[in-house]
Amino acid sequence: MEPNLKTSCPQCDGWTHQENRTCGDCRRYGMPDAMKVPYQAGDRIHPVHSPRTKYQIIEIKPADNGHRRGGVTICRVLKDGSLKREEAYSWRRNPGLDIVWSGNDEVVEWRKANMRDMSPNDLAEAVTWAEKLWDRAIAKHRAELREAKEYDDPGTCVIGAGIRVSNVAGKQAAFIRVPASAGQGSLTWERSVADVVAYLRGRGLDARYECGRMD
């Protein structure tokens, strides 16, 4: 079989090199989100980056293979109910309107519909299991590097890296620090962090990787 032979992913119809197996994106992030968006064009919502400010949805962008959680085009609403006619943002915008593109998971209503607040015990259980998954994946990766006689602590030395777990309102509920088995090189844990984030999201938690800063 040719090494570059491609076949379609059985979940998303994207390309994969492994026959009858899902592609890497589907394994890490799941299928393009098929859940019903809990709003329509014209609705007024609160984005996560500005939860006290009202925005109006101009356009809904459905989920696809490139943007698996979809997105919306939103415009800021002034106190008198009119739309703000300025170009105050550096993000993509339409001429004459303060229009911003935002991912569906950056809208408070979307997060409430797709994430859930766990009890302290359930949250602790999910975080503990995620830590074990990450630690095992890191240990396996470093063992493979040593077996291949390669440097087993590659990457940049950073501090403050980890996985931020938030509740539906966006407030941090937990922070999973990089396991001690990872050493100092960031590549040793970044190879497996997407799988851990995908596990937490599958439990209904809002998990995001924070890369920290270079030491």
Image (tube, rainbow, N blue to C red):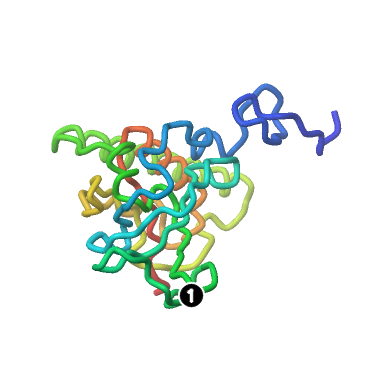
Q: Nearer the viewer, residue 109 or 198?
A: 109
Q: From what the image shows, is residue 151 above or below residue 214? A: above
**For mark 1, what is the residue?**
90
Quadrant location of residue 35?
top left
Q: Which of 135 and 80 is in front in this view?
A: 80
Number of numbered discs overlaid on the protein picture: 1
Looking at the image, the residue that sits furthest to the top is: 20
Classify mark 1: residues with Cα within 10 Å, few (<14), some (14-19) or many (20+): few
Question: Where does the image place residue 65, in percent across and percent down from the top left?
Answer: 60, 41
- Name the residue located 46 percent from the left edge and 65 percent from the top edge: 99
- Name the residue located 48 percent from the left edge and 75 percent from the top edge: 90
Question: Where does the image place residue 170, in percent across and percent down from the top left?
Answer: 25, 53
- Name the residue located 42 percent from the left edge and 33 percent from the top edge: 36
Question: Where does the image place residue 120, in percent across and percent down from the top left?
Answer: 13, 38
- Tell whether 82 sits left or right of 172: right
Question: Where does the image place residue 110, in percent across and percent down from the top left?
Answer: 34, 43
Quadrant showing the N terminus: top right
Looking at the image, the residue that sits furthest to the right is: 2
Label 1 is placed on what type of residue?
A: Ser
- Name the residue located 25 percent from the left edge and 45 percent from the top edge: 168
Quadrant showing the C terminus: bottom left
Q: Which of 171 and 148 is in front in this view?
A: 171
SS state under label 1:
loop
- Tell whether 132 sits left or right of 86: left
